[in-house]
Image: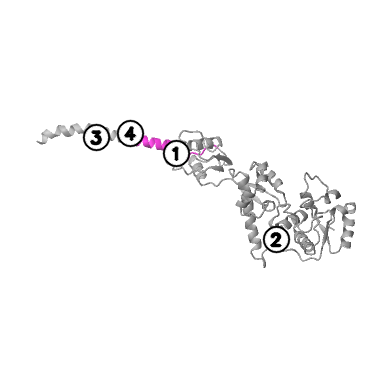
Amino acid sequence: MLEGNQPERQGARPWLRVVIRAVLFLLVLLGVTAAWLADYAWRPAPGTGQQAVVLIPRGASLAEIGSLLVLSGHIRMDRRFLPVALLGGYRGRLPAGEFSLATGQSPLAVLEGLATARPLLHPVTIPEGLRAEEIAEIFAAGGWCDPRSFTSLVVDRTFITRLGYADLQSLEGYLYPDTYLFTRDFRGAEKIITLMVERFGAVWRQLSEDLPEPADREKTVILASIVEKEAATAEERPIIAGVFHNRLRLGMRLQADPTVVYGLEDFTGPITKAQLRTPTPYNTYLLAGLPAGPISNPGRDTLAAVLHPAETESLYFVAKNDGTHHFSATLAEHNRAVQKYQRKNAPEKGKQ
């Protein structure tokens, strides 16, 4: 019985050898493939270690990202990129955006760096005291929005109401001046204006929350927009605010040249006597009280100066032509200062 089974066992051995050989072949093949992939995955690409920018569009596939990384100089062109990225678990982990990554790294290091990188931020600085049209031009110059769309939305009542300012006719004065940091895909007038108005709201809440009495936001912004245009130095903001508060309290006209300029179309300057006599909703030489609305977009310090004006007896000020002003409590003193600092331009420059 035992001898009869022996040929049967011997007949099975060739198949076992085939299986073993196949397994060994596959193991060798896997090892060679792994070594081939590892050689690419861990070998640094040519580069000096300097930063280079790569822009990844939304919806880009792994293959497309690989091509973009080749073009930006981060990796070598190689068909092994896709399997390395897939085996590394980077499908769905690579974000869209604009990124700065060091060159001279291995593909795996580049992939990990891209997966954890923060998008590049581009600063756009809006100085204090600009009009909406001037702000629109700054953003347009950087390609962030269309200037006509920007200025149109500033007076769009539906849009203004949606932002929570239904009582306003315009967002002039509420476009908060600051340095904004935008990612490359942050574009469009609506997004930008919304961000600026939201930042104004945050600043206003901080400035007004501890006041002994609630502040009139609209009047504060209008007056701050005038102070912003008049004040040449930070130290003078509270003083000029104090002068204007005094004049308003006494029923005196503000007689602020910048309000006249704001109400004129295509003003080129210098301001003339005829323009001072031109009726507009903003001409504070003719109007009592505040103009119809803000004439610029004031910053935090100017808003604070209007909320906390300096205690002063001054009712007048005139430019000294050195970036500062001379302040006077009486008209006689003011006229002497005008004669001293402005000479023949006194009727155009003095606050009377």
- Tell me the distance, in whole angstroms, between the alpha carbons under discs 1 and 4: 22 Å
Image spot of residue 162 (x, y percent): 60, 51
User: Residue 77: within the magenta?
Assistant: no
Instruction: Tell me which label, 1 or 4, sits earlier in the chain.
Output: 4
Image spot of residue 146 (x, y percent): 65, 41
- Tell me the distance, in whole angstroms, between the alpha carbons under discs 4 and 2: 79 Å
How dense is the environment of label 4, judged by Cα within 10 Å: few (below 14), some, or many (20 and up)? few
- Tell me the distance, in whole angstroms, between the alpha carbons under discs 4 and 3: 14 Å
Image spot of residue 157 (x, y percent): 64, 49
The circle drawn on residue 304 is: 2
Query: Would residue 246 appear left or right of 123 to someone viewing this image?
Result: right
Residue wearing tag 1? 84
Query: Of residues 66 and 235, which is closer to you in this image?
Result: 235
Image spot of residue 135 (x, y percent): 69, 47
Inspect the image, locate mark 4, and give the three-letter code of the amino acid beneath it: Phe
Instruction: Tell me which label, 1 or 3, sits earlier in the chain.
Output: 3
User: Residue 27: within the magenta?
Assistant: yes
How dense is the environment of label 2, judged by Cα within 10 Å: few (below 14), some, or many (20 and up)? some
Choose top left, top right, bottom left or bottom right for residue 312. bottom right
- SS assignment at label 4: helix
Verify CB contact (< 8 Å) between mark 1 and mark 4.
no
Instruction: Tell me which label, 3 or 2, sits earlier in the chain.
Output: 3
- Tell me the distance, in whole angstroms, between the alpha carbons under discs 1 and 3: 34 Å
Query: Of residues 114 and 121, which is closer to you in this image?
Result: 121
Inspect the image, locate mark 3, and give the three-letter code of the amino acid beneath it: Leu
- Which residues, given as a range, are shown in magenta? 25-46
- Tell me the distance, in whole angstroms, between the alpha carbons under discs 3 and 2: 89 Å
Residue at image location 85% in from the left, 49% down from the top? 274
Query: Would residue 351 appear left or right of 90 to someone viewing this image?
Result: right
How dense is the environment of label 3, judged by Cα within 10 Å: few (below 14), some, or many (20 and up)? few
The circle drawn on residue 25 is: 4
